[in-house]
Image (cartoon, grey):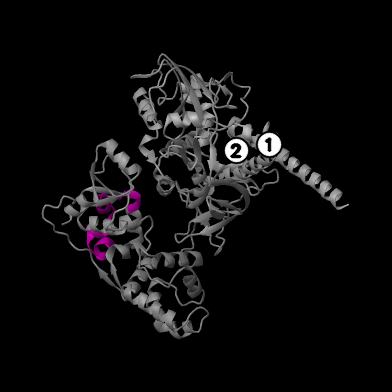
Amino acid sequence: MGIFYNVCMAKIADLFIRSEHADLMNKLNAWDVAYHQNDAPIVDDATYDVAKNRVLEIESEYPELAVNGFSTHVGAAVSEKFKSYPHKIPMLSISDVFNEVEVADWFNKLSDKNVFIELKVDGLSFSARYENGVFVRGLTRGSGIMGEDITENLRTISDIPQKLSGDFPDVIEVRGEVYMARDDFIALNEISDKKFANPRNAAAGSLRQLNPKITASRKLSAFGYTYGDLSERTWQTQSEYFAKLESWGFKTTGRWARIASSVTDIQSVYNDIMLHRDEIPFDIDGLVIKANSIAVQEKMGARANSPRWEIAYKFPAARGITKLNDITIQVGRTGVLTPVAELEPINIGGVVVSRATLHNADEIARLNVKIGDKIIVQRAGDVIPQIIGVAENDENAVPFVFPNLCPVCGGAVVQEMGAVARRCVNSLSCPAQIRGELEHFVSRHAFDIEGLGEKQIELFTKLGWIKQAADIFTLIDNHGDEMRVLDGFGEKSVSNLADSINRARNINLYRLIYAIGIPDVGEVTAKILAREFKSLENVRGASVERLMHIDGIGEIMAREIVSFFADNHAMSALDNLLKYITIKNPEVVVVENNMLNGKRVVLTGTLQKYTRDEAKEILERYGAKPQSSVSAKTDIVIAGESAGSKLVDAERLGITIWSESDFENAIK
């Protein structure tokens, strides 16, 4: 009975596993069609990878399922909209790995430990065939065996040469990736009726057009990275092949490529690229690691769907698809109402995301997002979550109606002529605005009062202990005894807060200007004003015309500054504050032969002896004008270790580049 029972249970388990495999394959095939043919993914990468890895796990236990399973699967079937042609050499996909252990497992199988590391560009793969140096046919990856004919579309992309230059084989299929740079993606979405969810979808949707004129109207770029059919080979390594590609007229990701000879080296490159990922002007989703030796590549060969000699070391997912449960409104310190997406929690790149910004009412309308829809979430710069598109509309979804009254205080909500933002007009008594102003006032780049954070500000304003900034400096004297008996407080915490408040009584002029919350005046503008006017009294008395003569201040900002200092309520609060603080006016820097004075300077990379803030402060003391981005007007770029795209831009524009030692020599 026991044996019969065990056999029956084994058969039932077997049926369940086979059923699970069939169900997952149906999902993966549907997801592939949505991604590869329709350019409209319906699940995020992480969900896809979990399903794929489970299928591969099942197929390793049940080899017979692999015959028509994922182990032999590449891309999706070609679309009937396009002519199709067979690839002379199959265009395989790359096996994914997700951690250092999996990298080591692959690396240890290499006979030659020299590997070539490239960026894994998030775009659409292509194969361009050249005969006698002339471009004759272009195909998509398609199923890996058959590809879609996109010859005329590829001809519209300037990065794909119509004729090879230099020394080239009689026949070669150059394979690579068509992509759309982030700036070009943003520009396309601003003018396009169809809003693309991300640059990859935009690139794929633009390339797979039946009308090449549409493709030509969109800014597509391309990199070459490998080859297919070939009449002869004159290179021995992948790194040599990159040099050949560039000599033929192709662009490559060579500026970011690295050679490594250990797992430690590979992980170091991975960490470095992850750190500077947002500086790369196009989307990447990992690294491709290849045996550098072509002889080793040929010896290792391929599985049914992927080469053995290369792997894709994937980054954590930067995007995900989840449900929009609700849209709530946050009221900021300036009264601006910001809609916030309340999400079904989702893990994106190792971080659980449950909220994301929707910016404003216009953005909600542009995205056409409704409560109940499945939406695409992205961690911008892998930090700030934002909604970038709708993945799937729900038939019961509810449109969001922007409120006409402030949800915090009930004040009227207005939208000024020509402005996008909607504001609560009740600036004097809206609790949200008061709390926001106070949180800004005590923040690190303003008065920097430790122990007085968001929770404490909320508590003390509710208790009525703090109504304006000046009250902070009488807080301990007036309410210290009451504070000591509150939960979470005690003698030590009150004493520490008192010390922090007292330290803040002496403040640099630019910090004070930043702290008092003049609309549109950030830290950089505050420093410009302090440097230009030398005292608060001079700033208060400045006219619109005088302000507009200052580099970096336009008419709108100038009028905001003048209006702020003309407001009686704001000036009453400022005068109260001035009773408790001492302003340290900026030093007048006099340095003979100062080569930094008046120069526009950009910092990039990591300096060894200075933090970014310290370096900026030194530059400002020497009369330089620190900038956040490189332009033709930039005078100097100071490049530390791991400098990224800003250094590349500086080299391209012929801008003077300094090392950290050059910087030190200039300030001696």
> Residue 365 in the image: x percent, y percent?
56, 44
The residue at which mark 2 appears reads as 41
Q: Amino acid at mark 1?
A: Pro
Which residue is at the front of the view, 39 or 455? Answer: 39
**Residue farthest left in this picture:** 592
| Quarter residue 43 falls in | top right
Residue at horizontal 11 percent and vertical 52 percent from the top: 593
Tell me, yes or no, whether the two marked residues, 2 and 1, touch with CB atoms within 8 Å: no
Magenta segment's dominant SS is helix
Spatial CA span between label 2 and label 1:
29 Å
| Quarter residue 514 falls in | bottom left
Q: Amino acid at mark 2?
A: Pro
Give left or right: position of 12 versus 627. right
In the rendered structure, does residue 553 fall within the stretch colored magenta? yes
Mark 2 residue crowding within 10 angstroms, few (<14) / some (14–19) / many (20+): many
Number of the front mark, 2 or 1: 1
The residue at which mark 1 appears reads as 63
Image quadrant containing the C terminus: bottom left
Disc 2 element:
loop
Relative height, residue 483 to residue 597 (above, below): below
> Residue 10 in the image: x percent, y percent?
79, 46
Whether residue 224 is visible, yes or no, is no
Whether residue 4 is visible, yes or no, is yes
> Residue 105 in the image: x percent, y percent?
52, 44
Q: Which residues are magenta?
A: 528-557
> Residue 11 in the image: x percent, y percent?
80, 44
